[in-house]
Image (cartoon, helix red, strand yellow):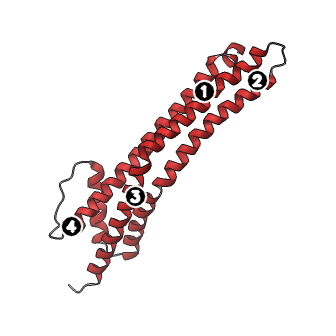
């Protein structure tokens, strides 16, 4: 067990775990950003379509789902339910930016946890060999490097485009909902 802790074994395990968390974060953010893009595009198309009810060519199942939800909202008899659905779209799109902050902070904290664990393991050693004292610490610093690198990569990949798509989704949703409410109040 000591060679695992003193050597590269524990460091590689921690770095591997950080990379797995990074991949999970990437998948989650990419999936949610794809949904926000599909919602923004669909609502934008409905806002600029020449005739109400003009069908946008659809590709993914997600786009079909959004189109069907939008149709149910537009034709709903229960306006409280329709407003609740619109609000759920708003909340889902607004959760994307805090999700990015959560994942980047988690990756940094996991990296620091590995380094602090290395310090703790180094302080537990009671021998006279200085290399055994500093060995775990020197290797565990790589967990901080891995955590910071993954955090920076995630921020760089999603930071600006995520904010732009969330803002666009919010504007399209506000305009689409305002048009929906005006059409509902207009005499037939």
* Quarter of the C terminus within the rendering: bottom left
Quadrant that contains the N terminus: top right
Q: Quick check: marks 4 and 2 in contact, CB under 8 Å?
A: no
Q: Marks 1 and 4, Cα distance to the nearest angstrom?
A: 52 Å
Residue pointed to by mark 3: 166
- How far is disc 3 from disc 4 in space, using C-alphas? 19 Å
| Residue drawn at point x = 65 percent, y = 31 percent | 114
Q: Residue 48: give its label.
A: 4
Disc nearer the start of the sequence (4/2): 4
User: Would you say the residues marked 1 and 4 are in contact, meaning their CB atoms lie under 8 Å apart?
Assistant: no
Sequence-wise first label, 1 or 4: 4
Q: Which residue is mark 2?
A: 122
Q: Quadrant of residue 135?
A: top right
Q: Which residue is mark 1?
A: 142
Q: CA distance from mark 3 to mark 1?
A: 34 Å
Secondary structure, mark 1, is: helix
Q: Position of residue 162 (x, y in %)?
A: 41, 52
Q: CA distance from mark 4 to mark 2?
A: 64 Å
Against 143, residue 79 (above or below) is below
* Percent position of residue 64, x then y: 26, 54
Foreground: 75 or 115?
115
Residue at disc 2, secondary structure: helix
Tell me whether the residue at label 3 lies in contact with that at label 1, contact meaning CB atoms closer than 8 angstroms.
no
Looking at the picture, does residue 130 appear above or below residue 65? above
Return the mark for residue 155. none
Judge from the rendering whether residue 121 lies leftward or rightward of residue 140; answer left or right: right
Q: Nearer the N terminus, badge 3 or badge 4? A: 4
Measured along the vertical axis of the image, is residue 162 above or below residue 77?
above
């Amino acid at each position: 067990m000591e060679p695992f802790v003193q050597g590269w074994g524990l460091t590689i395990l921690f770095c591997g775990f950080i990379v797995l968390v990074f991949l999970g974060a990437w998948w989650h953010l990419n999936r949610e950003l794809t949904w926000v893009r599909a919602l923004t595009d669909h609502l934008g198309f409905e806002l600029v379509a020449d005739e109400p009810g003009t069908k946008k060519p659809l590709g993914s199942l997600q786009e079909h789902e959004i189109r069907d939800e939008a149709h149910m909202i537009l034709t709903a008899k229960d306006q409280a339910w329709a407003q609740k659905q619109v609000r759920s779209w708003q909340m889902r799109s607004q959760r994307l930016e805090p999700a990015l902050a959560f994942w980047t902070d988690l990756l940094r904290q996991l990296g620091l946890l590995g380094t602090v664990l290395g310090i703790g393991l180094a302080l537990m050693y009671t021998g006279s060999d200085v290399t055994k004292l500093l060995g775990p610490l020197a290797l565990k610093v790589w967990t901080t490097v891995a955590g910071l690198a993954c955090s920076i990569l995630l921020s760089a990949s999603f930071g600006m485009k995520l904010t732009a798509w969330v803002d666009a989704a919010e504007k399209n949703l506000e305009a689409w909902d305002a048009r929906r409410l005006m059409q509902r109040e207009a005499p037939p």
